[in-house]
Image (cartoon, helix red, strand yellow):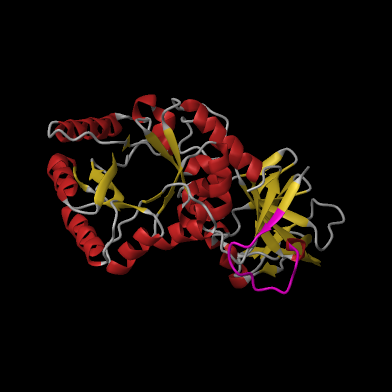
């Protein structure tokens, strides 16, 4: 049976009991999430684990719901960026291991990590000492699983790969800490030129050999993000960390060997229809002047909801399976469309801003290409005043 569920991912300032009364909303296809995870799982060896990265509210899709569907479909780990993101998952009853990908080092953060059974990333000897001392001070009576981050070329978080042995040896001697994995992050795995990716892998391998030479055997190794997972099976190691691909997008056009389905659609309603004459200006600054008499529709969604204002006069939407141009400057809460090609259009008709309608589709990649950015940014941009609506047969 078709499943439809209103997701309260954030307070919605409206006095409604149904998403169907909303001016605009985001649809999340749970079947697509499950499909994508299963497709990715098929690429991996049976012993290789899959981490679903659900940071930034699962790239704007709703972290708790995505996490539950991903775990039921083949993921065994979750990745978040911040302590509150991890706590949100625990409060929702999720018991799977959660890796904190960002750096944490205040006493309050460390206490919360221990309390909520999160697993932190350690990026430096100083941070490791702070963790150990804090856990000692709060009389933590166990060993906290920690994950050692090595910088092999991303130049972001992590200890220099050449000092891996020294760093790991220190952590093994500190009380209350237990190494759960050693990992690094790829900077160019989405590039057809694999030179830098190969260098990073070589550095990672050298660092691991350095650690093993000290008589320390890392319990788990992971290096691949979505792009690395799709690019080369030799990058899979003991676990892969999948973000973008879970949500149905390829990190690069050439990394498309499996079938992924976009999870997110953005929809809104027509709020007014009117006729305007030749020469009439539309929206702020009159950046569009009607070249002829047209029918204009106002739609209740704008840049405060996540539509980039730089798409003004450049984007299209879908109505009844047809592409319709947006005209004039995109405003905070509304956009205007030239609907002259849509006969007898009515107020309250549904407009697909991002997604598919019959045989037409508009994707985050389309917007990203127009704006010279990446699909990750587009997906994360939709604000939480747009309610999330789950559709599909899978139950989170």
Nearer to us in this view, 57 or 74: 74
Nearer to us in this view, 76 or 288: 76
| Residue 257 on the magenta span | no
Say whether residue 190 is visible.
no
Relative to residue 34, is residue 269 drawn left or right? right
Q: Position of residue 56 (x, y in %)?
A: 47, 56
Question: At 33% across and 37% down in the image, what residue appears?
Answer: 223
Question: At 70% across and 54% down in the image, what residue appears?
Answer: 5
Question: At 80% across and 62% down in the image, what residue appears?
Answer: 348
Say whether residue 119 is visible.
yes
**Overall secondary structure of the magenta section:** loop
Q: Position of residue 177 (x, y in %)?
A: 24, 51
The quarter of the displayed image where residue 282 is located: bottom right
Q: Position of residue 219 (x, y in %)?
A: 29, 36
Nearer to us in this view, 315 or 277: 315
Relative to residue 118, is residue 389 drawn left or right? right
Nearer to us in this view, 70 or 266: 70
Residue segment shown in magenta: 5-18
> Quarter holding the N terminus?
top right
Placement of 182 over or under 90, stated as above or below: above
Q: Residue furthest front?
A: 141
Relative to residue 71, is residue 14 drawn left or right? right
Q: Residue furthest right?
A: 344
Q: Position of residue 170 (x, y in %)?
A: 14, 48
Relative to residue 251, is residue 319 drawn left or right? right
Placement of 18 over or under 370, stated as above or below: below
Label tally: 0
| Residue 6 on the magenta span | yes
């Amino acid at each position: 049976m078709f499943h439809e569920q209103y997701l309260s991912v954030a307070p919605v300032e409206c006095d409604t009991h149904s998403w169907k009364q909303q001016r605009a909303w985001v649809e999340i296809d749970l079947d697509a999430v499950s499909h994508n995870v299963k497709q990715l799982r098929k690429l991996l060896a049976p012993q290789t684990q899959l981490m679903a990265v659900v940071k930034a509210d699962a790239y704007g899709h709703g972290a708790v719901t995505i996490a539950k569907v991903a775990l039921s479909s083949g993921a065994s780990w979750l990745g978040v960026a911040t302590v509150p993101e991890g706590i949100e998952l625990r409060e929702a009853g999720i018991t799977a291991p959660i890796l904190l990908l960002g750096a944490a080092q205040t006493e309050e953060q460390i206490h919360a990590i221990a309390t909520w059974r999160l697993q932190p990333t350690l990026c430096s000897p100083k941070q490791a000492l702070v963790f150990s001392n804090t856990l000692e001070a709060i009389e933590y009576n166990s060993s906290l699983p920690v994950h050692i981050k090595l910088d092999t070329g991303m130049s972001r978080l992590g200890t220099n790969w050449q000092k891996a042995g020294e760093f790991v040896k220190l952590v093994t001697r500190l009380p209350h800490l237990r190494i759960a994995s050693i990992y690094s992050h790829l900077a160019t795995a989405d590039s057809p030129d694999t030179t830098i990716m190969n260098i990073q892998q070589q550095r990672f391998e050298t660092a691991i050999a350095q650690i093993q030479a000290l008589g320390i055997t890392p319990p788990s190794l992971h290096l691949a993000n979505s792009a690395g997972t799709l690019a080369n099976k030799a990058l899979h190691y003991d676990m892969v960390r999948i973000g973008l691909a879970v949500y149905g997008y390829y990190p690069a056009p050439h990394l498309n060997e499996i079938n992924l389905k976009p999870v997110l659609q953005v929809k809104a309603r027509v709020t007014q229809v009117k006729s305007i004459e030749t020469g009439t200006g539309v929206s702020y600054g009159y950046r569009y002047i009607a070249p002829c008499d047209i029918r204009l529709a106002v739609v209740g969604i704008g840049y405060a909801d996540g539509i980039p204002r730089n798409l003004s006069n450049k984007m299209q939407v879908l109505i009844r399976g047809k592409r319709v141009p947006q005209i004039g400057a995109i405003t905070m809460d509304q956009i205007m469309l030239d609907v002259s090609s849509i006969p007898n259009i009515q107020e309250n008709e549904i407009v697909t801003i991002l997604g598919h309608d019959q045989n037409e589709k508009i994707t985050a990649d389309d917007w990203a290409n127009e704006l010279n950015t990446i699909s990750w940014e587009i997906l994360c941009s939709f604000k939480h005043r747009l309610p999330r609506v789950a559709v599909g047969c899978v139950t989170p």
